[in-house]
Amino acid sequence: MKTIYDVQQLLKRFGTIIYTGNPLGDLELIQDEVRELYNQKLIDVNDFKQAVLIIRASINKLQ
């Protein structure tokens, strides 16, 4: 995983598509969904860590 697109594709594998029209809001929802997938043991710790780093970097770029 290298980009936010890759994180979105990860979520898509689980049937989750997030688009509200608000980029910052989308990233916060994506982060919540990734965290939930990890808590339910549907993704491993490496995918979780990579996704969170990518999401945080994307949030920082928007701010």
Image (cartoon, rainbow, N blue to C red):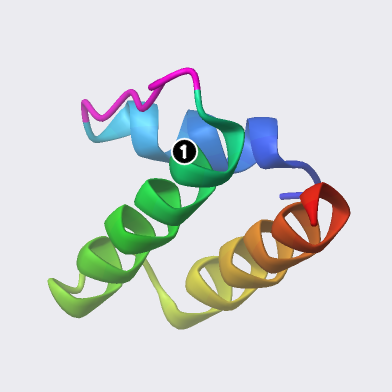
Under mark 1, the amino acid is: Asp
Which of 8/61 is in front?
61
Q: Position of residue 57 (x, y in %)?
A: 80, 63
Instruction: State the predominant SS element of the stretch in magenta.
Output: loop
State whether residue 39 is above or below residue 58. Answer: below
- The residue depicted at 45 percent of the width and 55 percent of the height is 28
Q: Give the magenta range.
A: 15-21
- Residue 37 falls inside the magenta stretch: no
Quadrant of the snapshot with the C terminus: bottom right
- The residue depicted at 36 percent of the width and 27 percent of the height is 18
Q: Which residue is mark 1?
A: 26
Q: Position of residue 24 (x, y in %)?
A: 57, 44
Q: Position of residue 43 (x, y in %)?
A: 34, 64
Looking at the rendered structure, the secondary structure element under dot 1 is: helix
- The residue depicted at 32 percent of the width and 70 percent of the height is 35
- Total number of numbered discs in the rendering: 1
Q: In the figure, residue 20 lies in which quadrant?
A: top left
- The residue depicted at 48 percent of the width and 18 percent of the height is 21
Q: Is residue 2 left or right of residue 52?
A: right
Which of 36/42 is in front?
36
Residue sticking out furthest to the left = 40
Q: Position of residue 7 (x, y in %)?
A: 56, 43
Q: Is residue 14 left or right of residue 26?
A: left
Q: Residues within 10 Å of mark 1 (few under 14, many from 20)?
A: some
Residue sticking out furthest to the right = 61
- Residue 16 falls inside the magenta stretch: yes
State whether residue 29 is above or below residue 14. Answer: below
